Image (cartoon, grey):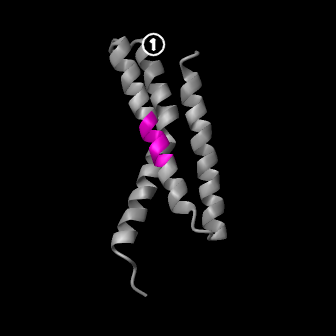
Amino acid sequence: MIEFIPATLIFFIELYLLILWFKSRRNKDGKDAKICLYGFLIGQIYIFYETAVVSRTGQPASGSLEQKMLMARFLLGASLGGLFTIMGLFYLSFGIFPRRK
């Protein structure tokens, strides 16, 4: 269970960033794009960390408990990072193609 500590830590950091993002959108203070970028970067660093761990320890056998734990850690740590990735793509597309009034 000690393997879940980094994933849980990343999840709570990204959850905090998501709450900050909602507050920033409500207050219209202009920090929402930076918060989205930070969430994206943290998610990508976590994905890199998990792939480094798997390459160091080896691929777990299909259907084993280790593989299920790997998928649970990956889902816990990378789910909000994926959400920040999608939101960041919207920021990029609206920045390149501005809305007409």
Q: Residue at x 55, y 55 (%)?
A: 35
Quarter holding the C terminus is bottom left
- Count of marks overlaid on the render: 1
Q: Nearer the viewer, residue 9 or 76?
A: 9
Q: Is residue 23 highlighted in magenta?
A: no
Q: Residue at x 37, y 19 (%)?
A: 54
| Residue 3: image location, x then y, percent | 53, 18
Residue 13, picture quadrant: top right
Location of residue 28 with respect to 70 vertically, above or below: below
Dot 1 surroundings within 10 Å: few (below 14), some, or many (20 or more)?
A: few
Q: Amino acid at mark 1?
A: Leu
| Residue 96: image location, x then y, percent | 34, 71
Q: Is residue 83 left or right of residue 20?
A: left
Q: Secondary structure at mark 1?
A: helix
Q: Is residue 60 visible?
A: no
Report the residue that reaches farthest toward the bottom. 101
Q: Is residue 64 visible?
A: yes
Location of residue 34 with respect to 9 vertically, above or below: below
Quarter holding the N terminus is top right
On the image, numbered disc 1 is attached to which residue? 65
| Residue 45: image location, x then y, percent | 44, 36
Q: Is residue 53 left or right of residue 38?
A: left
Q: Is residue 93 left or right of residue 76?
A: left
Residue 95, picture quadrant: bottom left
Location of residue 22 with respect to 81 vertically, above or below: below
Q: What range is drawn magenta here?
A: 39-45
Q: Is residue 42 highlighted in magenta?
A: yes
| Residue 63: image location, x then y, percent | 37, 15
Q: Is residue 4 left or right of residue 57?
A: right
Residue 27, picture quadrant: bottom right
Question: For the stretch drawn in magenta, what is the main secondary structure?
Answer: helix
Q: Residue at x 64, y 46 (%)?
A: 16
